Image (cartoon, rainbow, N blue to C red):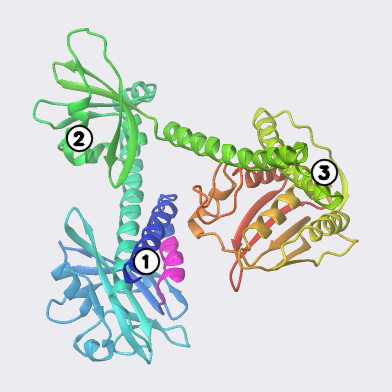
């Protein structure tokens, strides 16, 4: 049981870190990375303060990059830089040692010098421990590293409680993902600065125009393994700026270069090149790149294009086929079994038994029809040949009819309530498609309320739009996946180990229908657990 619990915790930690990597990697703004990092921490590790600091070995100063203490988001520009003190503060100790620190005796330690911040009731920013929040008892500090060098430290504070080693491990993982995302964002900024500098030279502008016309990434590697050329497309594909590639060993740019060099055949003196697609590690990311290589007087010229999206699409298609197969096989088996039973001459069924089997056939046939309808509707949406009406729709009537229909087939542990009035909330759209969106959202809310509870539908009118809300007390959706759930074939649990069955098309259909009626759709966490899905449409 202990091993099982440990494995479950490790699996949950891995899931959290994977979700964090996806969420943090979606932005190329360092400050937004910090904000998303804090957002993720809020759900994972309890704290009363978090401070992200950078460390410059050249001037020996520690500078605050992000600070949130006691519910206040501080402006880093107003916080003074601090001199490294190897003999004093815990933050300095972490920078010097390069090792994380867990302290549950902060009140004693800060007597030797700390680097916390607080905001008093008058709004004055103060450095701690000179005037810190009463009750601060625990802190965790983790170094931020770049190629083995300490370049900063992240500290987490907590009042009147303690931290555990397990929390420290999770915190370290979050910091590592944040550091990678910040590095990627700054590389993007550096690339932008390099391109701006190139624009100042007419000759470089001309060369850039030629290179921009080449859609494939181009890199030239000399016989010593050093990158001598790196075009703009290579920057876009890999996220590595030209300045971070040219003049550097190719192994510093591609983490798995030895495997690439060994697998990609190099064409000699006009011989046709053969492409090879391989996974390549680039700055903490795995990309699937298709390479061709040709020898030149300057070295080996490699051309590559990014097939990562194609591979992900292939994987999504594979998952979709597996899901559809499951969705079709289950009801088909039930229909066939019931029909064969009815046809058996050796069994004498009474009227009640026959009706029960016929009802099972009807129910499973309805499920088959629903799956087929979703697939066909998604196909029509992709082709853009789904006509939509534009008319005045009384939203209260649609909600009332839909909720009434659902009440007849609710599980015993789930209830549904409509808080929408019958009049006063009219929208412009297609009534049938609005009802379809509401049906999909309610169906999801009920299916994912694995422990039961109430599903509620409400609406409000504001700024010329009407918003409809569907609240549930289900399993919830991690922050990093709240946009992805509306993508085609996406499933929070694609292997059906926890989530109910489904095609992965329902929310995609909802998004497409709402957007084509001039609205928007989204999801957020619900206070007390669960999720709130919402969609907005223009008010009539």
Q: Which residue is disc 3 drawn over?
A: 432
Residue 383 in sight here: yes
Q: Earlier in the sequence, mark 3 or mark 1?
A: 1
Circle 3: element type: helix
Q: Depth check: give the residue in front, 200 or 504.
A: 504
Q: Please indicate whether residue 139 sits to the left or right of residue 87 in the image.
A: right
Q: Which residue is disc 1 drawn over?
A: 9
Q: Residues within 10 Å of mark 3 (few under 14, many from 20)?
A: few
Residue 246 in sight here: no
Q: Residue 459: x and y, percent?
A: 77, 62
Residue 474: quadrant of the picture: bottom right
Distance CA(mark 1)–CA(mark 2): 34 Å
Q: Depth check: give the residue in front, 25 or 331.
A: 331
Magenta-tinted stretch = 34-46
Mark number displayed over residue 257: 2
Q: Please indicate whether residue 180 sits to the left or right of residue 534 in the image.
A: left
Prevailing secondary structure of the magenta residues: helix
Q: Please indicate whether residue 291 sits to the left or right of residue 396 in the image.
A: left
Q: Depth check: give the residue in front, 440 or 151.
A: 440
How many badges with numbers are in the image? 3
Q: Earlier in the sequence, mark 1 or mark 2?
A: 1
Q: Residue at x 21, y 79 (%)?
A: 90
Q: Residue 178: x and y, percent?
A: 35, 58
Distance CA(mark 2)–CA(mark 3): 55 Å
């Amino acid at each position: 049981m202990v091993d099982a619990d440990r494995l479950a915790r490790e699996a949950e930690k891995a899931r959290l870190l994977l979700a964090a990597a996806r969420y943090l990697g979606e932005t190329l703004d360092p400050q937004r990375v910090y904000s998303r990092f804090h957002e993720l921490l809020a759900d994972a590790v309890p704290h009363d303060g978090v401070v992200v600091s950078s460390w410059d070995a050249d001037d020996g100063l520690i500078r605050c990059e992000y600070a949130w203490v006691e519910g206040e988001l501080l402006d880093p520009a107003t916080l003074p830089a601090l001199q490294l003190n190897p003999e004093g503060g815990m933050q300095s100790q972490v920078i010097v040692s390069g090792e994380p620190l867990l302290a549950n005796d902060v009140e004693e330690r800060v007597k030797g010098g700390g680097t916390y911040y607080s905001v008093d009731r008058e709004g004055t920013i103060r450095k701690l421990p000179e005037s810190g929040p009463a009750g601060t008892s625990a802190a965790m500090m983790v170094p931020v590293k770049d190629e083995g060098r300490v370049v900063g430290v992240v500290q987490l504070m907590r009042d009147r409680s303690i931290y555990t080693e397990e929390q420290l491990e999770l915190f370290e993982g979050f910091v590592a993902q944040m550091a990678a995302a910040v590095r990627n964002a700054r590389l993007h900024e550096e690339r932008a600065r390099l391109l701006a500098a190139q624009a100042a030279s007419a000759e470089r502008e001309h060369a850039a125009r030629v290179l921009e016309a080449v859609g494939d990434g181009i890199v030239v590697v000399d016989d010593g393994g050093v990158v001598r050329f790196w075009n703009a497309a290579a920057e876009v594909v890999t996220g590595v700026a030209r300045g971070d590639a040219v003049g550097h060993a190719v192994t510093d740019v591609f983490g798995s270069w030895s495997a690439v060099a060994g697998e990609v055949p190099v064409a000699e003196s006009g011989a046709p090149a053969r492409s090879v697609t391989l996974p390549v590690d680039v700055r903490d990311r795995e990309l699937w790149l298709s390479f061709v290589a040709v020898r030149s007087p300057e070295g080996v010229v490699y051309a590559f294009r990014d097939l990562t999206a194609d591979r992900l699409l292939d994987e999504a298609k594979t998952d979709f086929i597996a899901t559809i197969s499951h969705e079709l096989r289950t009801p088909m088996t039930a229909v066939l079994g019931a029909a064969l039973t009815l046809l058996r001459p050796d069994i004498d069924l009474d009227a009640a038994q026959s009706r029960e089997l016929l009802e099972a056939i009807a129910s499973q046939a309805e499920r088959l029809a629903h799956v087929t309808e979703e697939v066909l509707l998604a196909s029509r949406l992709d082709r853009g040949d789904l006509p939509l009406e534009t008319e005045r729709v009384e939203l209260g009537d649609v909600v009332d009819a839909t909720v009434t229909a659902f009440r007849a087939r609710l599980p015993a542990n789930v209830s549904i309530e409509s808080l929408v009035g019958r009049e006063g909330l009219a929208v412009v759209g297609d009534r049938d498609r609005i009802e379809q969106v509401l049906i999909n959202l309610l169906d999801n809310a009920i299916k994912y309320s694995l422990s039961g509870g109430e599903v509620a539908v409400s609406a409000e009118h504001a700024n010329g739009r009407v918003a409809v809300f569907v609240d549930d007390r289900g399993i919830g959706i991690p922050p990093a996946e709240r946009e992805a759930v509306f993508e085609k074939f996406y499933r929070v649990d694609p292997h059906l180990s926890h989530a109910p069955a489904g095609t992965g098309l329902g929310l995609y259909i909802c998004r497409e229908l709402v957007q084509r009626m001039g609205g928007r759709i989204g999801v957020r966490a619900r206070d007390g657990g669960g999720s709130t899905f919402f969609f907005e449409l223009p008010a009539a």
